[in-house]
Image (cartoon, helix red, strand yellow):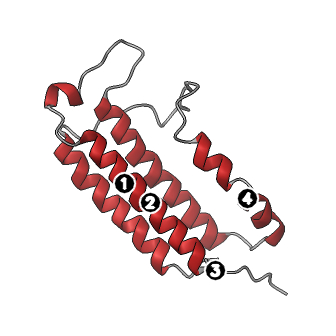
Amino acid sequence: MKNVMPQLTLEDRAFLTNHLTRTRDILLAEIAGLRPDQWTFRPDEESWTIAECADHIASIEKLTFSMVSKRMQAAEPNPQRASEVQKKTSWILEAVPSRHARVKVPAGIENTSHSSTPQDFVQLFEERRAALLKYVTETQDP
């Protein structure tokens, strides 16, 4: 008999929608009004530009969304594993945006800049975030 996993609850969808909307608004407010020289400024050789940081956020979000949605569609449901993952939500929400400790990114997801201006980034990011929000509100995946 196949395990049946629950779908997102209304509370889950509301939480995710709120979080994704709030973090989108914060990011867009942070880059609003930047001049091109600010967008591409590199304070030192070890630091990323704002453009690279922004594009990294968009790239990682796209990669993560792709990996998660593919695994959800392909994996056999495992209620025990789902319970373990649920316990990590608060840690993820705190650790991912934290800048307390610098971490080198793994190979393949190094800093890149695809958006030559903040306006280019806004268009790309809003399209990607809209797709993610649509998935959250409409998915029937467990």
Residue type at numbered disc 4 = Val
Residue depicted at 79% across the width and 59% down the height: 84
Name the residue beneath numbered marker 2: 20
C-beta proximity under 8 Å, tags 4 and 1: no
x, y percent for residue 24: 36, 54
> With respect to residue 92, does 111 lie above or below?
above
Q: Work out which residue is located at the far bottom of the displayed protein and give it.
A: 1
Residue type at numbered disc 3 = Gln
Name the residue beneath numbered marker 1: 24
x, y percent for residue 29: 28, 46
Helix, strand or loop at mark 3: loop
Q: Earlier in the sequence, mark 4 or mark 2?
A: 2
> With respect to residue 142, does 34 lie above or below?
above
Q: Earlier in the sequence, mark 3 or mark 2?
A: 3
Name the residue beneath numbered marker 3: 7
Q: Nearer the viewer, mark 3 or mark 2?
A: 2
Residue type at numbered disc 1 = Arg
Q: Can you tell which quarter of the image residue 22 is in?
A: bottom left
Q: CA distance from mark 1 to mark 2?
A: 6 Å
Name the residue beneath numbered marker 4: 85
C-beta proximity under 8 Å, tags 1 and 2: yes
Residue depicted at 38% across the width and 48% down the height: 58
Lateral position of residue 61 relative to residue 55, left or right: right
How many residues crowd mark 4 within 10 Å: few (<14), some (14–19), many (20+)?
A: few
C-beta proximity under 8 Å, tags 3 and 1: no
x, y percent for residue 127: 29, 61
Q: CA distance from mark 4 to mark 1?
A: 24 Å
> With respect to residue 135, does 46 lie above or below?
above
Q: Earlier in the sequence, mark 4 or mark 1?
A: 1
Q: Nearer the viewer, mark 4 or mark 2?
A: 2
Helix, strand or loop at mark 1: helix
